[in-house]
Image (cartoon, rainbow, N blue to C red):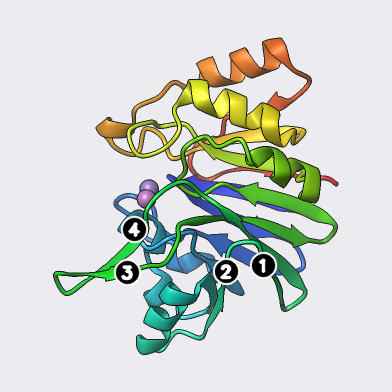
Amino acid sequence: MKLTWLGHSCVLLSGSKKVLIDPFIDGGSVTGTQPDIVAVTHGHYDHLGEAVALGKTTVASTEIAKYLKTKGVPAEGMGIGGTILVDGVSFTMTPALHSSSVEDGGAILYGGLAAGYVVGMDGVRVYHAGDTALFSDMKLIGDLYHPDVALLPIGGRYTMGVAEAMIAANFIGAKTVIPIHYNTFERIAADPEIFRKSIERTTDMNVSVLQPGGSVEIKS
Ligand code: NI
Ligand code: MN
């Protein structure tokens, strides 16, 4: 499976299907990626992004799925702790310590709980943490699902920063860790090289620091 970080929290998984998680990039569009399935971690604009414009089957919280259906998007609603299979791709919704709401025409709509996902495709499991603080039940995500790669926010302010994400990486124990949700805006400035060096000096894990648009091949 090829994993491409398009920027911010947006990741494209390309295998037997194309799965696009959190379809937002700053100052651009991801509609050209033509995914088969979209997954949205929570309702904030920098994650819900272009889900409506894409119009593909979209995995989301039951609340966001209902919102998307009112916009004509064929959504698959689910809840934290559950697993669903969509076109042979498995989605397990994991907890995230964060908020979730959808802004629509100046109104703020309840988005259910913020979440992350473990996506299973072609024998590979990818954990996308979404926006979250550090929480010790991340250990359970490692124990239960043994993800091959963990995508962790490091930008601070709204999520974990570098120090917290280092502990998160240890809790989860994936072979490969990829930092996300940093340097998109000044408010979430972070140095991914400090993150990489600190983890690689103290653990057996590898950190792939990608440029927006950059890819890595993930093996099980
Ligand atoms: Ni958020
Ligand atoms: Mn965010």
Of all residues shown, which one is farthest toward the front? Answer: 136
Q: Residue at point 26% right, 31% down?
A: 186
Q: Is residue 154 visible?
A: yes
Q: Residue at point 38% right, 31% down?
A: 156
Q: Disc 1 vs disc 3: Cβ atoms closer than 8 Å? A: no
- Of label 2 and label 3, which has the lower sequence position? 2
Q: Which numbered tag is attached to residue 110?
A: 3
Question: SS for tag 2?
Answer: loop
Q: Which numbered tag is attached to residue 82?
A: 1
- Of label 4 and label 2, which has the lower sequence position? 4
Amino acid type, label 2: Gly
Amino acid type, label 4: His
Q: CA distance from mark 4 to mark 2?
A: 17 Å
Viewer-proximal residue among 188 and 84: 84
Q: Which residue is mark 2?
A: 79
Question: SS for tag 4?
Answer: loop
Q: Which residue is mark 4?
A: 44
The residue carrying pointer 3 sits among few (fewer than 14), some (14 to 19) or many (20 or more) residues within 10 Å by Cα, namely: some
Amino acid type, label 3: Tyr
Q: Is mark 4 within 8 Å of ligand 1?
A: yes
Q: Disc 2 vs disc 3: Cβ atoms closer than 8 Å? A: no
